[in-house]
Amino acid sequence: MELDIAVHPATADRFDDLAAILAPRNPDAPACWCLSYRVPGAEFNALAGADRPARLRRYAEEGTPPGVIAYVGGEPAGWCSVSPRSSHHRLTRSRTIPAVDDVPVWSIVCLVVRPGFRRQGLGHALLAGAVEFARSRRAPMLEAYPIESGDERISTALAYVGTTSLFEAAGFERVVKTSSKSGGRERWLMRLPLEGEQPPEVDAAGG
């Protein structure tokens, strides 16, 4: 049975849907809320409890939505963090994932699929929606930093950065092997050119 999937930018009015995907069971648990790459380490460590989701919401309220949300039958099911690399404090200063040139790339740093929606191909649809969103915002290039998965099954704890096979299936190409690792696995810097394929600005895939 084919899933009824729609992917939309994570605008402020959709933040409750994003919270349904990212919120831990214990609201006081130190969940990342996709901030560890975005804000300086001192600020990240100082944020606790409800402060972290509030900080992420500010990105949507102040400018470019911080990513896209996938819906299955209208229910929030997945999240992909996609925004300009320059908006990620940790990336702009990273020694393990350095910039390879001066192109103002956008970065994908996280993909999350809720339990109950996994292993149904939603990751591919979510990534396709992220690509369309970046393209609609005139991003010249999209970048990601997935792990080398090989033929082994990857745990959900590691899969948040994506796998090389997932990104290759979406047309991304390997640029350079980084010195960053996730769960002991090597991570690649991969890219997908978007320039020259710019449609009129839209509400991303499905919108």
Image (cartoon, grey):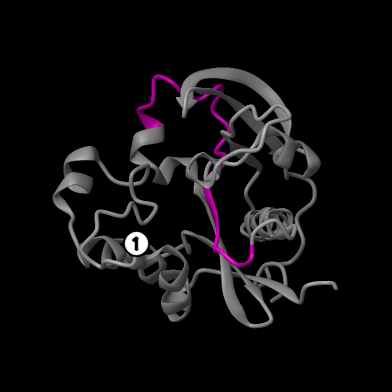
Picture coordinates of residue 29, whole percent (x, y): 24, 58
Residue sitting at x 34%, y 39%: 89
Residue that carries the numbered disc 1 in the rendered image: 56
Residue sitting at the far left:
46
Q: Amino acid at mark 1?
A: Leu
Residue 196 shows in the view: yes
Residue 50 lies left or right of residue 166; in this view the side is left
In this rendering, the answer to whether 96 lies above or below 81 is above
Residue sitting at x 43%, y 41%: 86
Residue 197 lies left or right of residue 7; in this view the side is right
Residue sitting at the far right:
1
What are the residue bounds of the magenta stretch? 92-117
Secondary structure beneath dot 1 equals helix
In this rendering, the count of numbered labels is: 1
| Res 59 → quadrant | bottom left
Residue 97 shows in the view: no
Picture coordinates of residue 125, whole percent (x, y): 73, 60
Residue sitting at x 48%, y 41%: 85
